[in-house]
Image (cartoon, helix red, strand yellow):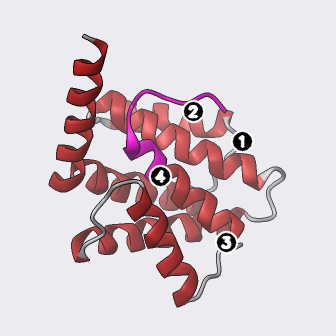
């Protein structure tokens, strides 16, 4: 898979989707703390607020996974959800209208996501909580400092 240029936000979403898929939607406290350690290794301070958003993200992804687990190629679908969600948020900067939402769903369907009424609701939840993470000041400042450091290295 080609590395994207949006920064570590993408990595968080992909790490979460992979975690849910690898855990088959079921995890215990040890797996949760290992997940948080993984996020910490990406350079993020996994404080209470960040933990709350990450927990909500995992639960949203879990609901989709539980509903669509029998879908052919669920691993690819979960990866597609992560990639499309991160890409969409980076393109829209966390703000979109109804036509943007429809485009997101269309792109998800192209990635193999099942789009029943229930899974659309869960994808909406994944997108909304991902938006909260994207807009989280600690994450935003980290992404900006990474971008600034990258630009100064390129100069």
Farthest residue in the bottom direction?
29
Vertical placement of residue 60 versus 108, above or below: below
Q: Is residue 97 visible from the viewing direction of this image? A: yes
Query: Distance from label 4 to label 3 (Cα)?
Result: 18 Å
The mark nearer the N terminus, 3 or 1, is 3
Image quadrant where one finds the N terminus: top right
List the residue tagged with mark 1: 112
Q: Residue at x 57, y 63 (%)?
A: 118
The mark nearer the N terminus, 4 or 1, is 4
Vertical placement of residue 39 versus 93, above or below: below
Query: Distance from label 4 to label 2 (Cα)?
Result: 17 Å
Viewer-nearest of labels 4 and 1? 4
**Location of residue 46 by image quarter:** bottom left
Name the disc covering residue 66, or none.
Answer: 3
x and y percentages locating residue 43 in the rendered image: 34, 55
x and y percentages locating residue 127 in the rendered image: 41, 51
Give the extent of the magenta segment: 1-12
The mark nearer the N terminus, 2 or 3, is 3
Dot 1: what SS?
A: loop
List the residue tagged with mark 2: 107
């Amino acid at each position: 898979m080609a590395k994207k240029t949006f920064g570590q936000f993408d990595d968080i979403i992909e790490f979460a989707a992979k975690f849910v898929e690898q855990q088959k939607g079921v995890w215990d406290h040890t797996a949760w703390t290992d997940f948080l350690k993984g996020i910490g290794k990406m350079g993020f301070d996994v404080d209470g607020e960040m933990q709350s958003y990450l927990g909500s993200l995992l639960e949203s992804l879990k609901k989709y996974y539980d509903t669509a687990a029998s879908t052919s190629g669920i691993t690819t679908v979960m990866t597609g959800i992560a990639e499309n969600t991160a890409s969409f948020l980076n393109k829209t900067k966390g703000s979109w209208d109804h036509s943007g939402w429809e485009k997101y769903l269309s792109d998800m369907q192209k990635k193999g996501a099942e789009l029943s009424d229930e899974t659309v609701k869960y994808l909406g939840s994944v997108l909304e909580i991902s938006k909260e993470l994207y807009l989280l000041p600690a994450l935003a400042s980290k992404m900006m400092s990474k971008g600034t450091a990258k630009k100064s290295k390129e100069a």
